[in-house]
Image (tube, rainbow, N blue to C red):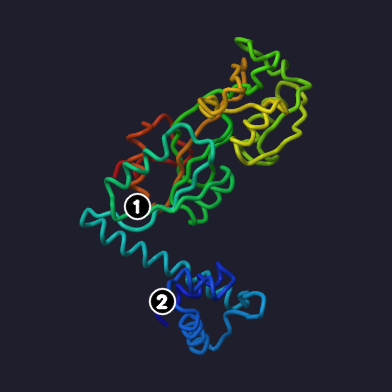
């Protein structure tokens, strides 16, 4: 059993295909298949069930893949920590980003990170805060930018607040409320809304606020993309509640109207609470310089960013 065999097994499990796994590993399919067959003979167990349409892991394969992932992570971590002792940051930073992050300029932060650590690589994943937090807890992401309502804290991860802002009403430029200097949530009663999907943290920011105010609303449009939500507003199909920075310069046909006692959205940078990788600690130092610490979340000492 060798390291390449472990990597091949994990890639096949992830891709559900020997062909795609071989492409990802930059080897021929026959070479990859030969190595996995040799490993199966060594273990005395079939790891995958192959058919003309798909590949799936056996019970033994599922158990083996889980441990193979742990072994590969441990090996990668050992290499990174060894390099870190000489002042070098290597490895791939797995970064999760919500589409509405505004507290930091993500491309600028990444540019500075790469300038300081040219040997490091970055793997970006875009998603909602709930899914990204789960991936950080599971070790599938090193760092993530999250956006949560004011009374909700990241759980199971270390986190640092990097920004907060009160949501504003996004209304069409021709809407009767567009000229208002300030409105209340009750002024939005009876209007058609566009919002993030139900059950997500982005949606909860508005749902909780309207429920607390005793105001019912009709969310006729759901979308994962703030850009699409703004497009629906610009088309005079709906109104929405969004972070003010999300609206800046996006749509001239959409007007931001301040909402009195509207919901507050807090952005966090989150990371593994127990053993952040050296590449994650290096990235957190860059984030800290770009967005100085305001508040810390549960169980967070600022150690990883300051080491």
Could you tell which of marks 2 and 1 lies nearer the N-terminus?
2
Residue 130 image-quadrant placement? top right
Residue 167 location, x and y as percent?
58, 24
Location of the C terminus by quadrant is top left
Residue 212 location, x and y as percent?
70, 24
Q: CA distance from mark 2 to mark 1?
A: 23 Å
| Observer-nearest of 154 and 39 | 39
Compared with 41, 253 (above or below) is: above
Compared with 202, 277 (above or below) is: below
Do we see residue 295 in this rendering? yes
Residue 268 location, x and y as percent?
48, 37
Q: Secondary structure at mark 1?
A: helix
User: Residue 4's mark?
Assistant: 2
Side (left or right) of 151 relative to 295: right
Compared with 88, 262 (above or below) is: above
Do we see residue 273 in this rendering? no
Please state which of the two labelled residues, at mark 2 or mark 1, is closer to the viewer: 2
Residue 289 image-quadrant placement? top left
Residue 254 location, x and y as percent?
61, 23
- Identify the residue shown where x is 43% and y is 76%: 27
User: Residue 24's mark?
Assistant: none
Side (left or right) of 141 relative to 257: left
Side (left or right) of 80 relative to 23: left
| Observer-nearest of 201 and 233 | 233
For disc 1, the marked residue is 279
């Amino acid at each position: 059993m060798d390291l390449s065999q472990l990597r091949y097994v994990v890639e096949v499990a992830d891709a559900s295909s020997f062909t795609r796994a071989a492409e990802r590993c930059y080897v021929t399919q026959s070479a990859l298949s030969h190595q996995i067959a040799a490993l199966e003979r060594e273990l005395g167990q079939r790891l995958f069930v192959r058919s003309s349409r798909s590949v799936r892991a056996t019970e033994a394969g599922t158990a083996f893949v889980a441990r193979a992932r742990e072994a590969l992570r441990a090996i990668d971590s050992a290499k990174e920590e060894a390099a870190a002792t000489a002042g070098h940051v290597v490895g791939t930073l797995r970064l999760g980003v919500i589409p509405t992050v505004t507290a930091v300029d993500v491309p600028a932060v990444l540019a500075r990170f790469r300038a300081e650590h040219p040997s490091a690589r970055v793997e970006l994943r875009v998603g909602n805060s709930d899914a990204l937090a789960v991936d950080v807890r599971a070790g599938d992401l090193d760092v993530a930018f999250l956006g949560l309502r004011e009374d909700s804290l990241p759980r199971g991860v270390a986190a640092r607040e990097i920004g907060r802002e009160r949501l504003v009403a996004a209304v069409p430029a021709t809407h009767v409320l567009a000229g208002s200097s300030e409105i209340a949530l009750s002024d939005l009663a009876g209007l058609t809304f566009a919002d993030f999907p139900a059950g997500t943290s982005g949606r909860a920011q508005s749902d909780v606020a309207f429920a607390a105010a005793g105001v019912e609303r009709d969310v006729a449009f759901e979308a994962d993309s703030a850009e699409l939500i703004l497009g629906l507003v610009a088309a005079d199909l709906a109104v929405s509640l969004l972070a003010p920075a999300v609206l800046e310069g996006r749509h001239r046909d959409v007007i931001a109207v301040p909402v009195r006692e509207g919901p507050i959205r807090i952005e966090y940078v989150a990371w593994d609470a127990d053993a952040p990788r050296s590449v994650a600690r290096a990235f957190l130092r860059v984030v800290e310089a770009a967005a100085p610490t305001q508040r810390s979340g549960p169980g967070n000492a600022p150690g990883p960013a300051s080491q």
